[in-house]
Image (cartoon, rainbow, N blue to C red):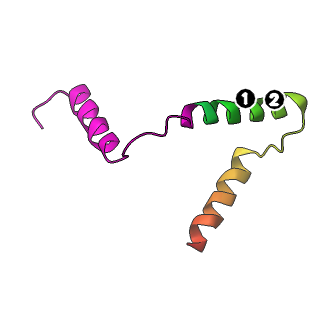
Amino acid sequence: MDLPEDERAELAHDLVASLDGTPDPGAIDQWDAELLRRLAEVKAGTAELHSRAEFRERLKERLQRR
């Protein structure tokens, strides 16, 4: 607790990251491809977009079902 805030944050990040195990080497490329696909849908006008209020309501409903 005597460490400066930025050092404590870095330490906390490193500790949490150590719990994740070995990263999937293809995950970054797969996420990049997915983001590009979704961006293309938005630009083409084919994506189903939701307002922030609708998203929050749907999330709230999902969490209540747990």
Q: Which numbered circle lies on residue 36?
A: 1
Q: Dot 2 lies on which element?
A: helix
Q: Residues within 10 Å of mark 2 (few under 14, many from 20)?
A: few
Report, in whole angstroms, how far the alpha carbon at label 2 lies from the one at label 1. Answer: 6 Å
The residue depicted at 69 percent of the width and 51 percent of the height is 55
- Tell me the amino acid under the disc marked 1: Leu
Region in magenta = 1-28
Res. 41 image quadrant: top right
Residue 61 lies, in percent from the top left, at: 65, 66
Q: Residues within 10 Å of mark 1 (few under 14, many from 20)?
A: few
Q: Which residue is mark 2?
A: 40
Q: Is residue 31 left or right of residue 9?
A: right
| Number of on-image labels | 2
Q: Quadrant of the C terminus?
A: bottom right
| Residue that sits furthest to the front in the current view | 25
Res. 1 image quadrant: top left
Is 13 drawn above or below residue 65 in the view shown? above
Q: Nearer the viewer, residue 23 or 12?
A: 23
- Tell me the amino acid under the disc marked 2: Ala
Q: Nearer the viewer, residue 22 or 13?
A: 22
Q: Nearer the viewer, residue 12 or 3?
A: 12
Residue 35 lies, in percent from the top left, at: 69, 33
Let me know if residue 8 is in the magenta part. Answer: yes
The residue depicted at 9 percent of the width and 33 percent of the height is 2
Q: Are marks 2 and 1 in contact (CB under 8 Å)?
A: yes
Residue 56 lies, in percent from the top left, at: 65, 53
Let me know if residue 4 is in the magenta part. Answer: yes
